[in-house]
Image: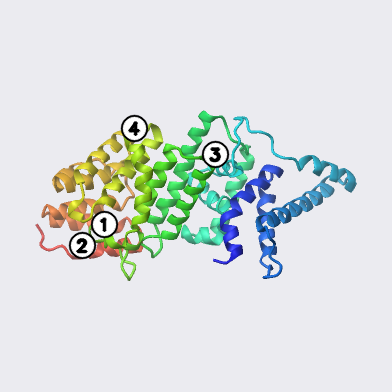
Amino acid sequence: MDALAQVWRDEWGRLLALLVARYRRLDLAEDALADAFAAASRWGPSTTPANPPAWLLTAARRRVVDRLRAEAVAARKQPLLAVDAALAEADQPAAVDPGGLLVDERLRLILLCAHPALAPEAATALTLRLVLGLPTVDIARLFVVTEPAMAARLTRAKRKIVTAGVPFAVPEEATLTRRLDTVADVVYLAFTAGYAPGAGPDAVRAELAGEAIRLGRVVREVVGARPVLDALLALMLLQHARRDARTDAHGGIVLLPDQDRARWRHDEITEALELLMPLLETPSPGRAGTYVLQAAIAAEHAVATTPAATRWDRIAARYAELDALTGSPVVRLNRAVAVAEADGAAAGLALLAGLDARLPASHRLPAVRAELLARLGRIGEARAAFDDALARGGNRAEAAHLRRRREALVGDR
């Protein structure tokens, strides 16, 4: 990564937040910062400034002021002197937030992007664009949509922020805690999109998951250690640590029991466990509690040295807690898998009852049912369940895996 790309990666969100805080114009701030980086692309060994972020901020501010001056002259037809006076009034530091908190400007930007007025998918894309500075073309690739489609999604999200009157401010502590739950959900949505792609050829998109982890680190850096953020980061690290072993040389899916555990990133597992262990000592309320339970489940897989050493009884118990806490049909599906490992396929199959109405489009539900039916020797029913899973679509790599599993069935009992 060259020096300018590193500055973009490290400083984009901070610089954009400073510009939005000063000028209260998201569109102008983003365009001006992009222009500044474009101008910086012409730096050479002898022209690179000693302080690149400061240079970029100054260049972007000049572009904002030029644009504001042009807009004011066109709209008001005032003399330049009057326009400059108005600009000087606007070009003042941001007011203190209602909560009276001294915070990193990026927190305001993060809360702006993850506002409840936005749909989760739009908030996720907007956060990746504005906080991390990912180019639209890269976000489109990560979400497997066209660049024009992603550009339109981002434009709609920005317009919604303006029309909804979303403030660029940090709320009182009690409200901030609730808003951070939404931020955590936005980050995790980006992460799960990397490991549960609904379209495209790839079984996983580790780059998107990696960017989500980077976003989680940024949020934790600007807010500080909080249970919901610590648990979320631990969960993502534990799952992401297996990325090199999740697929084979041809891009095919490698199931957890078949993964080469030597290829897991054990340094990331260690970091995650250090974040998680204190949270297991005291129950965490609300959203933090759900992430703690999910991370605890992932930790059981991470610490098992072999598939046979996996404590499925503990995993099933954690899923029972999570099921009671959330009532989520996806949690119930995952719980059924764990119970099948701990108590047998029949027990797991019983937990799938009633899920079809709640997960009508999920290909994972019939796929799990097919596996459990096959273990029970009900091969004809297993084949039908595999056919159902294939008919519901999903990722191409997942479909290939399902076809292989169906073809491996023997008999017709």
Badge nearest the viewer, 1 or 3: 1
Alpha carbon of mark 1 to alpha carbon of mark 4: how far?
A: 30 Å
Q: CA distance from mark 2 to mark 1?
A: 19 Å
Asked if residue 260 lies left or right of residue 28, the reply is left
Question: The residue under label 1 is which amino acid type?
Answer: Leu
Q: Quadrant where the N terminus lies?
A: bottom right
Numbered circle sitting on residue 282: 4
Q: Which mark is residue 256?
A: 1
In the picture shown, does residue 363 fall above or below 116? below
Q: Which residue is mark 3?
A: 117
Amino acid, disc 2: Arg
User: How would you rate the neighbour count of disc 2 (Cα within 10 Å): few for under 14, some for 14-19, many for 20 or more?
Assistant: many
Q: Which quarter of the picture shows residue 402?
A: bottom left
The residue at the point 32 percent across, 55 percent down is 392
Front-lying residue, 408 or 311 = 311
Image x and y of residue 408, in percent: 17, 65
Q: Residue at x 51, y 28 (%)?
A: 174
**Measured Cα–Cα span from mark 1 to mark 3:** 38 Å
Q: Quadrant of the C terminus?
A: bottom left
Residue type, numbered disc 3: Ala
Q: Which residue is mark 2?
A: 406
Compared with residue 269, is residue 96 higher up or lower down, i.e. above or below? above
Distance between the alpha carbons at the discs numbered 4 and 2: 45 Å
Question: Which element carries disc 4, helix, strand or loop?
Answer: loop
Q: Are marks 4 and 2 in contact (CB under 8 Å)?
A: no
The answer to whether residue 48 shows anywhere in this view is yes
Q: Secondary structure at mark 1?
A: helix
Say if mark 3 contacts mark 2, CB within 8 Å.
no
Q: Give above or below for 330 relative to 54.
A: above
